[in-house]
Structure formats: structure tokens, C-alpha cells
Amino acid sequence: MSQVDFHILDNENSSSLLMYACRVTRKAFINGYKVYIRVDNKQEMSQLDSLLWTFSELDFIPHRCVDSECGQEPVIIGMIEHKGGSNTVLINMSTQLSSNYSDYSRVIELIGNDPEIKSAGRDRYRQYQKMKDKLKNHMVSVN
């Protein structure tokens, strides 16, 4: 059984979701976790890559975008199933459930306010329920 946290943003702006992803990533990194951020497309991957360099003047978060199963940086951004670990957090921004999510120490599902993204999030929530995972919802207001 895995701990899965759904962070549901009430903000309409898609850039708010990306900034929030950076904040969650920073928190996990500072707490000593490796992080895999799974996205759906190269545009999101590129935007997150840029934001992780610039969103905070005080923090440096070493990261890398990958297209294949490589990369040893503490934070990896990609669109593939990536090998999890007991000290790795999966931040899922993809509309798909990761088949290996139970390999991660924790799963954080980030859900934006777009109707299609919300619908895909509800589907994943039901899938996690069927597998008897521990689910927790967090309503998030981002400025």
C-alpha cells in the first residue's frame, strides 16, 4: 500500500501549477528525497526545467530532463516510466497513472483546474482506491 497525496489547485492559471510543482519539488529535495516529476509532453518538461532554475533566488535544485532511463541528478523531469526507489518521491503531473508508482516512497498527484485534467485525476483516484492505497486530498490555493 502506498501513500498518495492529491494536491488539487483551485487556480485557473496553468503556470500556477508549474510554480507549485517547483515548490513541492524544493520541499522534497530539501528533506533529502530524490524526485521524479512525470509530465505528459516536452513543453511541460521544458517549462519546468526553466522554472527550476529561476523560481527561487535562494535555492539551487540540481535537475535534468530525460527521455530515457538515465540520469543520476536528485531531480529528474521526464515523460516515461522511471525507476522509483525507497527514497524517491514521484510528482505526477501526467494524466496517466504510473504503473510502478508503488516503487516510490511517496506519490504526489498534482491536479490543475482544467476540466480534462480534473477528470483524468478522478480516474486515477479511483484506480488508487481499487488498489487499497492510502489517499489524502489537499485543496491548494496558489496566488
Image: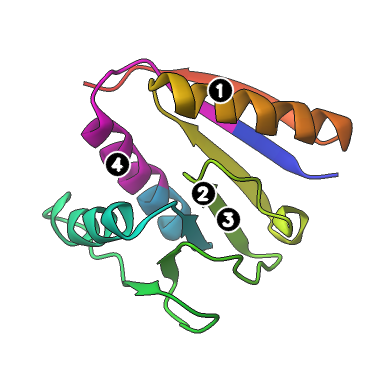
Give whichever of 132, 67 is nearer the camera: 67
User: Tag 1, which secondary structure?
Assistant: helix
Question: How many angstroms separate mark 2 from mark 1 (CA)?
Answer: 18 Å
Give whichever of 87, 90 is nearer the camera: 90
Per the image, the residue denoted by label 1 is 119
- CB under 8 Å between discs 2 and 3: yes
Name the residue type under label 4: Leu
Q: Is residue 26 within the magenta segment?
A: no
Label 3: few (<14), some or many (≥20) within 10 Å?
many
Question: How many angstroms separate mark 4 from mark 3 (CA)?
Answer: 17 Å
The image shows residue 111, relative to residue 40, as above or below, that is: above
Query: Residue 47 is drawn in which quadrant?
Result: bottom left
| 109 on left or right of 116 | right
| 42 on left or right of 124 | left
Quarter holding the C terminus is: top left
Quarter holding the N terminus is: top right
Per the image, the residue denoted by label 2 is 91
x and y percentages locating residue 45 in the rendered image: 32, 59
- Disc ID at residue 18: 4
Of marks 4 and 2, which one's residue comes earlier in the chain?
4
Name the residue type under label 3: Val
Q: Residue at x 20, y 53 (%)?
A: 51
